[in-house]
Structure formats: C-alpha cells, structure tokens
Image: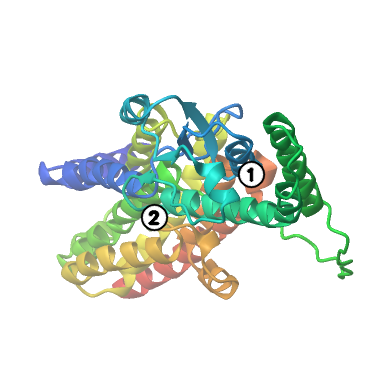
C-alpha cells in the first residue's frame, strides 16, 4: 500500500510541475506579492528604541534674546508635541535642516518684546516643509504657545502700565519689574483661582488589540492566499481523473479507495507544506518576520491548515462536473476565502459582527492562529482551539468529498 501511495504522490508532483509556469504561481507570485503588500502596509514595523525622541523638531533662531522670547519657547516646550533645536543663525538652520531633515524653522525677530510692550502685531517667520501631519502638528503647537504667551502678556500688562507712570525707576529696575510681572502672570495662568471638579462613572478601558501589519500581515496573508490555490488545485486533479475515466478504472484495480484518497490527499498536502515552509523561511530570513520560537509547533499548525485546505479541494473536486469548472472555482474560492478571512487586511479592523460571520471559513482560523504565533508569541495552548477547528474542517470536508466520490462511481 505504501508503494502505491508513493506512486500516486510522485505522479501528482510530476503532473503539477510539468510546466515552468507552475513555479511562477507556486513561488514567484507569492514572494512578489508578499513584498509589495508588506511595503504598502508599512514594511517591517520595527519598534523604535525607547530613548529615541520621535517628536517633530523645530529649529529656533532667537534673535531677540529677551524674557518674552524665552517665555514663548518655554510654552512650546511645555506643550510637549514638538522638540526645539536652538541654532544661532539662518545659515546654520538651513544647513541643519538639509542634513537632518528638520521639518520647520522658527525665527523670533529682534524687537519681539518691544512689540509686545507696545501692543503691536508681529508675525513670526515660520518656514515649513511640505504639508503633512507633522507640519500640521507643528502649526497647532505654535498657535497654542502663542496664545498662552499672549495671555501672559495681557495679565502682566496692568503692572506694566503702573510701572510706566513711575519716573524714579532705573532701566535695570524696570527690566527686573517686567520680568517679575511676566513670571507672576505665568504662575496665575498655571494656577487659576477657579476650577471644575468632574465626577464621572468609571469606564473600563478596552483591552489593547494586537494587529498584524507590514510584513507580518503580508507574510502570513500571502501564504494563506497562494497556498489555498495549491490546496484547492487538488480539485482539478480529482475532476480531471473522474472526467477522463482514470478514477473509475483505478477503482477496478487492486488499489483501494482508501489508498487512492490517502495518496491524493498526501500529495497535495506535501506540496502545500513545501510551499508554506519556503514562504515562512523567506519571511523569517529576508523580511525579518518572527514566526515564533517553536518550529515544530509552527509545522504542526501549517500541516493542520494544509489538511483543511486539501480536504476542501477533495470536496470541491467531488462537486464539480469538469476540470474547467474546478480550475475556475479554485482561483475564485481561494481569493475570496483569503480576503474574507483576513489574509489581505487585519481582521481586527473589521466590525465584530463581520469577525463572527467569517469564522465559518478555515482561512479565518488560519489567520487567527498566525496572529497568535507571530504577534502574541503563543505556544500550543494559545493556538489549540485553531488547531482543533482546522482539523474539524478537514474531517468534515473529507467526509463529504469521499461520500460524493463514491456515489459518482456507483
């Protein structure tokens, strides 16, 4: 029996890869689409070191060098949306911007404090790069800081008016009084006399959702997509052999139905495992996708997914009448099941009702298992449910397919 099974497996492999175009669909397109979609979804999504400041930066040229310009810069820093990089001249700012890609240059012109004292309107030159979310964040941060600085000046203005009427103050004393007034005004704004006490029922925070993206999503998703084509491709062989009478003739030989079905299922399963292992190795070594710490557990899960897909191909082959129908349905069903099951986009971004409905697909459980392995680093216990469901799918599809194939020969 083993020799007959081996002969069936060998014949199916030779038939599957008889033409070079088969390798394009088996490896070429899966690798290409894994790269394209992974880049589109954000690449490797490598985590930034915790000590790296990722806030947008502003190059600041303070030509006024006064208390007022210092308060403005302090307000920008306290906003914590952006970070400031102080330079001494326009030339240095332009050089730094070109070398280190700073998105903005802010100039505080000479006479800034004098303009505030005289209640004059003054525009601060801000040089921004191309419009983006970063430049919008910089604009909002500066607007907030300018509003706060304006409020400080309005609070301090009363003191400055009184000081302006005194003739006995030296220039040094007047400057010191100005600084004191501005500091006091800033403290008043930071510590208002009135506040609002908010009483709100506690709301439980939603659990954080781990979402695959970048090459994590494309490596697993394209593996499911293209392997499904290989797995369902068994339906074409089943339909072709039934259509040309090969299956019926084989049933008249000493080869049992059990041997025939085991050989066909095993050949398609081995093909898919070869394809999946190659795609996993490509994702792991080239795209730096973390496929978990247990290669054996991963291989078991791949085999369970392969079993479910192979059995589905058997069932599909028993339902169609011709090989052409099987060929057309293989591509359509593979793409549809892969996309609906989360192979093309993370299931976590879809509505809960959608996530519940698509659990009728084996591809959904495959992607759930890959998410647990790649993102959550789950072991056997974490993916035991997915393994059981995929095996259940495989047994159900096998039962329907074998029952239909037996009836087709009676």
Q: Secondary structure at mark 1?
A: helix
Q: Which mark is residue 310?
A: 2
Whole-angstrom CA distance, mark 2 to mark 1, is 64 Å
Asked if disc 2 and disc 1 are in contact, CB closer than 8 Å, the reply is no
* Residue 143: % across, % down: 53, 55
Q: Is residue 211 visible?
A: no
At 48% from the left and 37% from the top, the residue drawn is 57
Instruction: Judge from the rendering whether residue 343 lies leftward or rightward of residue 244; answer left or right.
Output: right
Q: Secondary structure at mark 2?
A: helix
Q: Which mark is residue 261?
A: none
Quadrant of the drawing holding the C terminus: bottom left
**Residue 313, quarter of the rendered image:** bottom left
Residue to which mark 1 is pinned: 75
Give whichever of discs 2 and 1 has the lower sequence position: 1
* Residue 247: % across, % down: 24, 61
Q: Residue 143 versus residue 52: which sits nearer the camera?
A: 143
At 30% from the left and 29% from the top, the residue drawn is 98
Quadrant of the drawing holding the N terminus: top left
At 87% from the left and 70% from the top, the residue drawn is 201
Q: Residue 279 versus residue 403: which sits nearer the camera?
A: 279
Tell me the crowding category of disc 1: few under 14, some 14 to 19, or many 20 or more residues within 10 angstroms, Cα based: many
**Residue 18, quarter of the rendered image:** top left
Q: Is residue 88 above or below residue 313?
A: above
Q: Residue 38 versus residue 193: which sits nearer the camera?
A: 193
* Residue 107: % across, % down: 43, 39
Q: Residue 205 versus residue 107: which sits nearer the camera?
A: 107
């Amino acid at each position: 029996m083993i020799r007959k099974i081996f002969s069936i497996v060998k014949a199916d492999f030779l038939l599957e890869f008889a033409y070079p175009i088969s390798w394009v669909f088996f490896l070429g397109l899966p690798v290409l689409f894994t790269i394209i979609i992974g880049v589109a979804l954000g690449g490797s999504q490598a985590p930034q070191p915790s000590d790296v400041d990722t806030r947008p930066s502003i190059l600041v040229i303070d030509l006024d060098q006064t208390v007022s310009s210092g308060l403005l810069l302090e307000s920008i820093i306290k906003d914590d949306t952006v970070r400031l990089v102080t330079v001494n001249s326009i030339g240095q700012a332009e050089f730094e911007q070109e070398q280190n890609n700073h998105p903005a240059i802010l100039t505080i012109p000479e006479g800034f404090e004098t303009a505030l004292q005289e209640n004059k309107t003054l525009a601060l030159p801000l040089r921004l790069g191309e419009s983006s979310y970063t430049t919008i964040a910089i604009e909002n941060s500066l607007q907030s800081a300018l509003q706060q600085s304006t409020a400080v000046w309005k609070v301090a203005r009363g003191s400055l008016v009184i000081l302006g009427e005194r003739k006995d103050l030296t220039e040094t004393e007047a400057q010191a009084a100005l600084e004191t007034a501005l500091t006091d005004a800033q403290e008043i704004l930071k510590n208002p006399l009135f506040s609002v006490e908010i009483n709100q029922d506690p709301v439980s925070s939603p659990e954080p959702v781990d979402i695959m993206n970048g090459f994590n999503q494309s490596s697993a998703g394209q593996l499911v997509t293209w392997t499904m084509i290989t797995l369902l491709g068994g339906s074409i062989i089943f339909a072709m052999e039934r259509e040309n009478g090969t299956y019926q003739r084989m049933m008249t030989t000493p080869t049992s139905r059990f041997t025939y079905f085991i050989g066909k299922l095993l050949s398609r399963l081995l093909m898919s495992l070869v394809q999946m292992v190659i795609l996993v190795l490509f994702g792991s070594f080239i795209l730096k996708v973390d496929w978990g710490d247990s290669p054996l557990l991963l291989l078991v899960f791949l085999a369970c997914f392969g079993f479910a897909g192979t059995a589905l191909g058997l069932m599909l082959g028993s339902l169609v009448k011709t090989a052409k129908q099987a060929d057309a349905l293989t591509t359509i069903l593979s793409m549809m099941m892969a996309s609906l099951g989360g192979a093309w986009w993370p299931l976590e971004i879809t509505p809960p009702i959608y996530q519940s409905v698509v659990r009728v697909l084996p591809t959904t459980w495959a992607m759930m298992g890959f998410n647990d392995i790649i993102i959550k680093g789950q072991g056997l216990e974490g993916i035991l449910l997915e393994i059981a469901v995929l095996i259940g799918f495989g047994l159900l599809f096998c039962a329907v397919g074998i029952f239909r194939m037996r009836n087709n020969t009676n």
